[in-house]
Amino acid sequence: MTLDEILPDLRRQSVDVRHAETGLWAASMLRDRISAGQLAPGAKLSEEPLCEVLGVSRNTLREAFATLAGEHVVTRIPNRGVFVARPTADDIREIYRVRRFLEPAALTWSTASPTDALHAAIARARAARSDGSVPGMASANQDFHAGVVALTRSDRLNAQMTQVLAEMRLVFHSMVADPLFHSPYIDDNAVILAKFEAGERPAAAALMVDYLRRAEQQLLEAHART
């Protein structure tokens, strides 16, 4: 989708939930749209319409852009403007380096936590697979991994994972037409969850490490072909 296509929805949400006029709030609004796959890599983020629909000043919006640039979600090109980032091979490697610290540790050290959200994510992924919806599978798999980190009950770790998943959405854009990438991982998620619920935490973590290794390699190979 383009920026113009998401502006009406962004306007409605900003009216409903607008907070103080802060760059962090504006950044979260844009990050959510990128995480949801509504803005593709390379999409231009024009200041004037965004300031108008969000109800913020140019300075506030520029603070938001600076925050997102620090997260590698947007990039500023001199004399051209701000664009949704296009992840490089090095970005993919860094994303997965972070994920290998976050997700296996969450499975290993989290105390007993409700896993309903994880089961629901797997169910949504399987339904999307049956419907042939690649975006649906990608979104549900993202929700599963966010749910894994949420087991820690740590706001800081959840915030870190939110940033990582926003970048992941941009990486997945290159796999949007490949159902064979997402499909096998749905069943892997179910196995990992079963191990976790059975109290086999080290086994669940080991499976996640292998999962992330395979996914990283596939994405690097896909990136090399683009």
Image: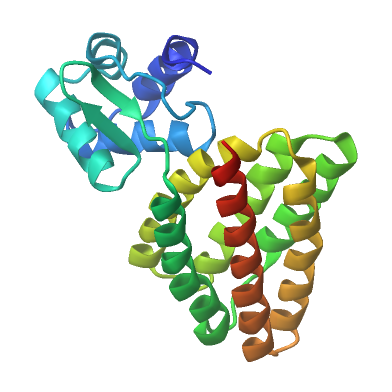
Q: In this image, 203 relative to 67: left or right?
A: right
- Number of labels in the image equals 0
Single out the residue that lies furthest toward the left: 59
Q: Up-down: is 6 above or below 91? A: above
Single out the residue that lies furthest toward the front: 225
The image quarter in which residue 215 lies = bottom right
Q: In this image, 168 relative to 196: left or right?
A: left
Q: In this image, 36 relative to 11: left or right?
A: right
Q: Up-down: is 152 above or below 203? A: above
Residue 115 percent coordinates (x, y): 67, 68
Q: Residue at x 70, y 90 (%)?
A: 200
* Of residues 220 and 172, the one drawn nearer to the viewer in this rendering: 220
Single out the residue that lies furthest toward the right: 130
* Of residues 49 and 172, the one drawn nearer to the viewer in this rendering: 172
Q: In this image, 107 relative to 197: left or right?
A: left
* Of residues 188 and 111, the one drawn nearer to the viewer in this rendering: 188
Residue 71 percent coordinates (x, y): 30, 48
Q: Residue at x 79, y 51 (%)?
A: 183
